[in-house]
Image (cartoon, grey):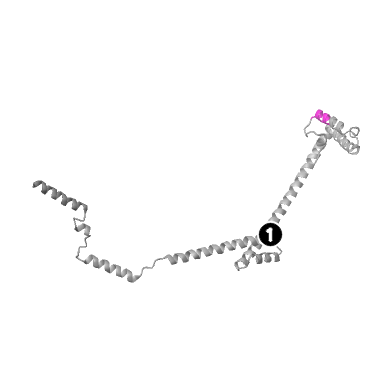
Amino acid sequence: MATLYDTLGVHAHATPDEIKRAYRKAAMKWHPDRNAGAEHVARATFQEIKDAYAILSDAAQRKVYDAVYAEQMRGWEAQHARQQQAQAEREAAARAADEAAYAEMVSLAMRFADEGHNRDVLFGVLLGRQCEARRAAQIADSVAALQASRREAEKGVAAAATFEASETPETPVASTQAEAAAAKDEAASPVNHARPEETSNDAHPLGALSGLWYQFLNGLRL
């Protein structure tokens, strides 16, 4: 919203001298004699500059203009705020409706996917519910991919359970009882099951060395 101050190129608190200098500069720039070939535009702009200076150069008129302009600005700002709020409410309502429609389409696609239908069927069902083609394709792709990942996960869990069941060792009862009886008999037997290397000194290197040492001592006695 342009003001008289904008027309002269000064701020709203400009002094009278600043207003006068700005007027002279703008008048020289837009004087029709200085704008050959664009006299019509220059003449209209030059007239606006003169009207603005006539009001702002008069203290009483400037005061009235500032008061009226301030009142108009307050009204305009209030109206603009109401318009912005109404626009924001409309946009929020539109987003909520769009999100609700999207959630409904996703729920519908999930239901058909749970029944075993493939991606093309999901896409066709969504189109039949007046879903936009691009959104229908996106939902169908996402739901089909999710359903496929779920099936793979379920297969993996089932395979793991089957593998664990097959790997569990089963100990035969008869074999366990036979081993227990053999261990009991061995413990009750009086026979000393000594290893040959423990009963024969000659078989051990230390036993052979002791025999040679004994023969050497006998030789010294003789």
The residue beneath circle 1 is 135
Placement of the N terminus among the 4 image quadrants = top right
- Residue 96 horizontal side relative to residue 153, left or right: right
**Visible residue check, residue 103:** no
Image quadrant in which you'd find residue 182: bottom left
Residue extending furthest toward the left: 222
Kindly report the secondary structure that dominates the magenta region of the rendered protein.
helix
Q: What element carries label 1?
A: helix
Residue 36 or residue 222, whichever sits in front = 222
Image quadrant in which you'd find residue 7: top right
Q: Residue 92: x percent and y percent?
A: 69, 54
- Residue 177 horizontal side relative to residue 125, left or right: left
- Residue 29 horizontal side relative to residue 128, left or right: right
- Magenta segment: does it hold 138? no
Residue 141 or residue 215, whichever sits in front = 215
**Visible residue check, residue 17:** yes
* Residue at (78, 42) in percent of width and height: 73
Residue 212 or residue 30, whichever sits in front = 212
Q: Residue 64: x percent and y percent?
A: 82, 36
**Where 47 falls versus 155 (above or below)?**
above
* Residue at (81, 28) in percent of width and height: 17
* Residue at (58, 63) in percent of width and height: 148
* Residue density around tag 1, few if under 14, some if 14–19, many if 20 or more, within 10 Å: some
Q: Residue 83: x percent and y percent?
A: 75, 49
Magenta highlight range: 15-22
Residue 185 or residue 142, whichever sits in front = 185
- Magenta segment: does it hold 21? yes
**Where 68 falls versus 211 (above or below)?**
above
Residue type, numbered disc 1? Arg
Q: Residue 162: x percent and y percent?
A: 47, 66
* Residue at (67, 61) in percent of width and height: 137
Q: Looking at the image, how many numbered discs can be counted on the residues?
A: 1
